[in-house]
Amino acid sequence: MGIFSEASNYAGNPVEEQDKTAKELMAKGRKVIKLSRGDPAVYFKTPKYIIDAYIEALREGRSQYEYFYGAQELREAIAQRYSRMYNLDLNVEEDIIVTNGVSESLIFLNSVLMDNGDKAVLFKPYYTLYKSLLEINNGRAVYGNYDEKNSWAIDLDHLKKSLLHSKRIKYMLVTNPNNPTGTVLDRKIMEEVVSIANDNDLILVSDEIYDEILFNGAKFTSLAQIAKGTKHVILNGASKNFDAPGFRIGYMIVPGEDKISKGFKERVVRYAQMRLSVNMPAQYAIAEGMRNVREHKKALSYMVREIADRTNFAYKLINESRYMDAVRPNGAFYVLPRLNIKDIKIKDDTEFAKRLLLEANVQVTRGSGFGSDNHIRIVTLPDKGVIKEAMERIDGFCRKHK
């Protein structure tokens, strides 16, 4: 079967599946409120000092191919960040690989580890691309659960049972803070996950792209702090914390010196060589973003303060509705409300999201795209006036179909 036939089996990215419809509605003059894409730069301008560094890189002629591992300055800045924040000592020359966003890190991860029939542990609800990129590489998912009744904590008992009956599992992937729930996992839970990964001889992967977007007193634990001696990979990037999603700067950290970790790094490097390099001026701009701690903290503190206010406001309005209820988020910028589907004459979350856009001009993402049926994901980046209007439209839509 050819590559295009294979690709047709995958649904793509559910976050984007209604973009065409939304664009058509807006072209007709409809005021569509978009709560579907987690793009902070739409609502908070990328900090000026990062933009200035990008411009300076261009003026200095830094527009040629860069080293396939990533620019030395950026890898050093990443190493300094993880040393400063998480006390992790990295080998700059071998442990860090710069990628075109975390998406390319995931492509490398699955390309290296998956052979036909191999498996990976994903936790429901998961970020949409985890499953698609796994399956494109002929991998299969074994599902653990984030337990909604327990503030979306990982269900450790269910995880142990899932692993008990599965073979050929290569890695286990945790998202912390979480997209789509906004949950920040407790350190004890993370330590248990590390222990389970060790017991089952798995590579543990941690997507930490939101690691500085924390509020409501939440405390984040990086895998770097607790996984010493465990085979692990850390994924991160500039899209969220540094408010630069369009720069497409991500990175993989692989600190282990064991045989499997070394072999993994060697194979990732081969893929990195084939795509030549990552955007060069963007790498120098994000290196400055990480080095200039004072300016970063200034920009980040304002953004996080606003995100916290907007997220808590959205959460309050959701739980005041008779048609939805949600667990309170403490990180990232999402809420994943459960639809009280029995009170609404609508089949499921897929139909709900489609008709909400067509009838009420609000674009959300269906929860089933994250492996969580009868939920919707709401992005909480717009200002409170927009969020209030969106919630009123959603509530009115539900009343219409009760």
Image: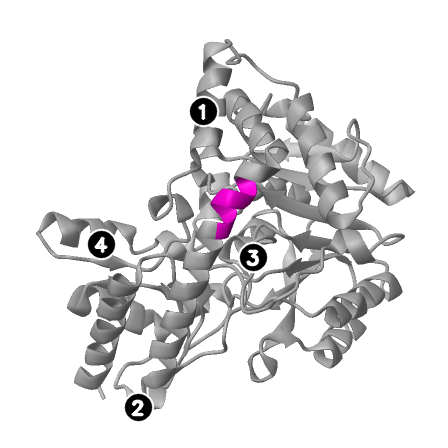
How much space separates mark 3 and mark 4, taking CA atoms?
A: 24 Å
In magenta, the rendered stretch is: 296-301
Nearer mark to the viewer, of 4 and 1: 1
Nearer mark to the viewer, of 1 and 2: 1
Quadrant in the picture for the C terminus: bottom left
Q: Residue furthest top?
A: 61
How much space separates mark 4 and mark 2, taking CA atoms?
A: 27 Å
Q: Quadrant of residue 11?
A: bottom left
Question: Regarding mark 3 in the picture, which secondary structure is present there?
Answer: helix
At 38% from the left and 53% from the top, the residue drawn is 37
How much space separates mark 2 and mark 3, taking CA atoms?
A: 31 Å
Question: Regarding mark 1 in the picture, which secondary structure is present there?
Answer: helix
| Residue 299 is a magenta residue | yes
Nearer mark to the viewer, of 2 and 3: 2
Q: Earlier in the sequence, mark 1 or mark 3?
A: 1
Q: Quadrant of residue 390?
A: bottom left
Residue 135 screen position, x and y as percent: 58, 53
- 283 relative to 257, above or below: above
- 236 relative to 124, above or below: above
Amino acid on which the number 2 mark rests in the picture: Asp
Report which residue position mark 3 lands on.
Answer: 131
Name the one closer to the observer, 28 or 308.
Answer: 308
Report which residue position mark 1 lands on.
Answer: 52
Amino acid on which the number 4 mark rests in the picture: Thr
Residue 304 in view here = yes
Name the one closer to the observer, 380 or 267.
Answer: 380
Report which residue position mark 4 lands on.
Answer: 21
